[in-house]
Image (spheres, helix red, strand yellow):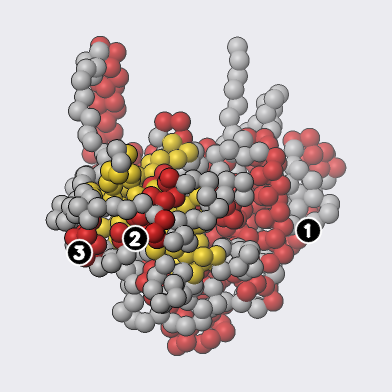
Amino acid sequence: MRMRIHPLLNDYPEQALLACVVSGWCPKCTAQPTNFDNDPSAILRSHEHTNMLQETFKGELSTLWDGYGIIGDVMPFTTHFPRADIHELLSPDLLHQVIKGTFKDHLVDWVVEYIGSVHGKTRAKEILADIDHRIAAAPLFPGLRHFHEGRGFKQWTGDDSKALMKVYLPAIASHVPPGMVRAISAFLEFCYLVRRSQIDGATLDQIEAAVARFHQEREIFIQTGVRNDFSLPRQHSLSHYRFLIQQFGAPNGLCSSITESRHITAVKKPWRRSNHNEALGQILLTNQRLDKLAASRVDFIVRGMLEGPFTIYNTEPMVASRYPRMIDQLAAYLGQPRLVEYIRRFLYDQSHPNAEICGMDVLLDLCPEISSQLRVNVFHSATSTYYAPSDLSGTGGMHRERIRATPCWKGGPGRYDCVYVEKDADLEGFRGLHVVRVNLFFSFRFQQSAYSCALVQWFSTYSDSPCEDTGLWRVQPDYDVRGQRMCSVIHIDTILRSAHLIGVAGSHLLPKRFTYHDTLYSFKLFYVNKYADHHAHEIAF
């Protein structure tokens, strides 16, 4: 008979209880709570080590309790298992140790406490309101939650914390000391690295380096009086992640959010369906019906009842109506008098792919002529499909997102997304990419060839390296000699995927009526948000 012992997914209090360790001590190692991350005598816990200590200090329960964090009169349930050790079975928990623990319960609260202690009640209230305003002013992005009121949650959930992590760093920049920004940047780097679905040796080295930077930079919280020490078991658990990943694999599949999601379907949603009066019986009945429906589906599949023709809905973008079809009329309608010129320069690039001078820099007379009667189809969106196994994705880890360029979004102002454009495939990370903002998706035929294009506004990189504090690249809008935004037409095949830009606000407070609709028009400098999702973190470093 083969027995399989699986890792245990528990929050810290449950881990301490299962390991029979005193609360406040680490269930994985013997590090002293007063010096969690710098205790040279700390070793990994094991049944053998615990048994040796109990034999050495037999009857001295207080010595075991105070000196080693061991509850001497209680034994872990795996003590007599021949091939199991409770200390080795405790797996990493991204939800409670990293997302809700270190980020929400520690770092976010510490920032609020620092601002309150330094600036006084009135000024602190203004700064915290501006941080919320900056969060709310983050532009829309596929799959990114929009916080209409900033951090104003009545009750935080794991999803709230995950979403806030994506936009929090630029919001606090310049409102807190650079050291705090660097500490949170190092933590976010660690968090996004360990949440990857595929982790190799190089990633493990990056994880270890991020933890070391975080431990170094978080001293700012002691220097500013926010903390007296870092006797925090959840935060200390970050030090064990390299070893735990080597033991259990990528933590993305070992997170208590798995059981939390089951709790939602089995308890929370049935509770909402009930009349809230003696709801237990109603919850159980709902679960029975859900189980029967699931069993019926399996039976129908076995019987072949679900096989046959299915309706395949067309997910390709539809041609937008109410636009002129002739190129000259379209240019006038859009207020883009140089659209014909941009198309001609684009066609030069298509016919001279190896030219030393790009189409935007050659004489216009050298570019192909196009008829004023050229027919154009306009689209309000395009789709991008790419490999992103660390994000919510479909078969084979392929992720699909829709990029918008529409004059009206959900009954309000237009939405014109930013995208990454390939610059040089030989360069790593963001150095091999451009960022542009899409103004128009369109297609046309020229000399028997079909072209799918985008009219875009260009951004240029602000520096040769990312920001020293946030670790984010910065870009600035490009302008021509007349002070107008630099535009061009590009082929949509050069578009990699959506990009998320967040304005660099500095120490200034945002105007009260400023909204996310204004962000991409108003700022002179932007952060390239690599924390928008995991794929962005992997390509925009």
Circle on res. 333: 3
Density class for disc 3 (Cα within 10 Å; few <14, some 14-19, many ≥20) is few
Q: Nearer the viewer, residue 182 or 396?
A: 396
**Disc 3 marks which amino acid?**
Tyr
Residue pointed to by mark 1: 38
User: Residue at the location (26% across, 58% down)?
Assistant: 406
First in sequence: mark 2 vs mark 3: 3
Q: Is residue 70 above or below residue 228?
A: above
Q: Is residue 320 above or below residue 436?
A: above
Whether residue 401 is visible here, answered yes or no, is no
Q: Nearer the viewer, residue 534 or 402?
A: 402
Q: Locate residue 116, reporting x and y percent.
A: 52, 81
Q: Locate residue 476, reporting x and y percent.
A: 49, 69
Q: Locate residue 4, reporting x and y percent.
A: 59, 22
Quadrant where the image shows the C terminus: bottom right
Q: Give the quarter of the image for residue 291.
A: top left
User: Residue at the location (81% across, 42% down)?
Assistant: 53
**Disc 1 marks which amino acid?**
Asn
Q: Give the quarter of the image for residue 216.
A: bottom right
- Which element is circle 3 on? helix
- Which element is circle 2 on? helix
Q: Give the quarter of the image for residue 285.
A: top left
User: Residue at the location (66% across, 44% down)?
Assistant: 203
Q: Nearer the viewer, mark 1 or mark 3?
A: 3
Residue pointed to by mark 2: 341
